[in-house]
Image (spheres, helix red, strand yellow):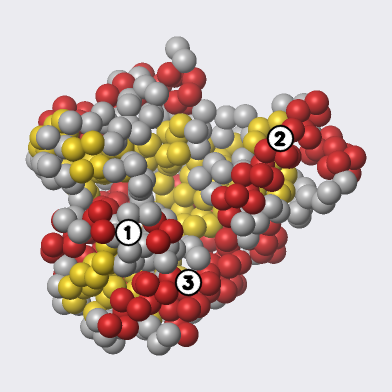
Amino acid sequence: MIEKVVIANRGEIALRILRACRDLGIATVALHSEIDSDAKYVKLADESVCIGPASATQSYLNIPAVIAAAEVTNASAIHPGYGFLAENSDFAERVQQSGFIFIGPSPASIGLMGDKIAAIKTMEKSGLQCVPGSGGALGNDLDEIKEQANAIGYPVLIKAAAGGGGKGLRLVEDESHLETALAISQGESSHGFGDSTLYMEKFLNNPRHIEIQVLADSYGDAIYLGDRDCSIQRRRQKLIEEAPAFGIPDEQRHQLGESCVAACKEIGYLGAGTFEFLYDGEQFFFIEMNTRVQVEHTVTEFVTGIDIVKEQIRIAASEPLQITQDEVKITGHSIECRINAEHPVSLMPSPGVITRYHPPGGPGVRIDSHIYTNFEITTHYDSLIAKIITYGSDRNEALARMRGALEELVIEGVDTTTALHQKVLGKNKFRRGIVDINYLERSLNN
């Protein structure tokens, strides 16, 4: 069984994993860069190991250093969190080859879902509907690509097969912009992922972004934990998430969840995962699967009462799922606001020292954050500094508690996106649940 876990990450997710391990009676090893030596999760862990300088490529992305830390501390398992090495199939394989348990899916599943083209083909075979597109990788023949784009119908999206986070993604309104978009996407994909493979999809004008959370064990069982709406985005980066998704018929939710469970069983998936869809014209179109814990897993935990990180660890320890599908009950409503150290209008990063920090509280309010007064935010890592999550008996109560929590939150010394969240929550259309993935961009321009 798992006795000691190496936490191969930083920030709020490192602290989140540490707390889950502590609840389970599992010892923890916090890995950190030189600049993170005073981080809260480093101080709270049973052990800590410095794995390199501030640069992520020399520390958190340094596979030999991560595995060496597990070896010298006699750890049982490695939890990758999200980001960094979480969806790196080579890392997962090397962890297992070194004799450690990887708390996540198999390297094969990570590799399959990491290749967006292969993932789409696999999900189509499993019966999930996908966005109309090229059906495979784009070749080098521009005339052939133009024919494909015309067959799909403009506007189209050029996407990186190994992509994520908006890198390698380009919207093409008409044929005159196609060649330039291909060159830019190919360059971004090659630089960001070491893979220049591209594919093409039909651009859906104003869809919603809906996710299905799944858990699957090593005994062939899988369940889904309801859905989330992650439509409030800017530059393809999520800012606000909620569960359950507003205004979707229960029968449609159930059918989609069962389809995702069937897909998990088909590919032999293990652990926690998220199926992502675009919801347009009352139809769901599969776009990708994330083979890790999501930033927004918190809202699902609130409405189901299930600790997803603990379940990840139990599954990795070869335990069966602790709950059946019939026992999964969605109760109430939950909303998450991602607080970033960024200017609320320009969204430019705002590094610096937090001179004052006061988290909100009260019934139905949860804060996942690693910051504290005098904590230094650097330019080396992601700007996410806190997640505020609220729960209510219904959406209105969850919204009211979120507005109160944002008013109570005090973070001084750096700019934050708190004011942006307050602006969105004050919009009438958001309060009525009339949103899509382009809603935030439109509302900010009005």
Q: Which amino acid, by three-letter code, is at mark 3?
A: Phe
Q: Amino acid at mark 1?
A: Pro
Of residue 130 and residue 25, the one placed in the foreground of this image is 25
Question: Looking at the image, can residue 214 be seen?
Answer: no
Q: Where does the image place residue 195, in percent across and percent down from the top left?
A: 65, 56
Q: Tell me how far mark 3 sits from mark 1, CA to CA.
A: 20 Å
Residue corresponding to mark 3: 91
Q: In this rendering, which labeled residue sits more in front, label 1 or label 2?
A: 1
Check contact, mark 1 vs mark 2: CB within 8 A.
no
Q: Using the image, tell me which numbered label, if any, was put on residue 53.
A: 1
Q: Residues within 10 Å of mark 2 (few under 14, many from 20)?
A: some
**Residue at 70% in and 53% down:** 197
Q: Which residue is mark 2?
A: 181
Res. 42 in view: yes
Q: CA distance from mark 1 to mark 2?
A: 36 Å
Q: Which residue ends up furthest to the right in the rendered image?
A: 143
- Residue at position x 64%, y 51% from top? 190
As drawn, 266 above or below 201: below
Question: Which callout, 3 or 1, points at the residue further toward the start of the chain?
Answer: 1
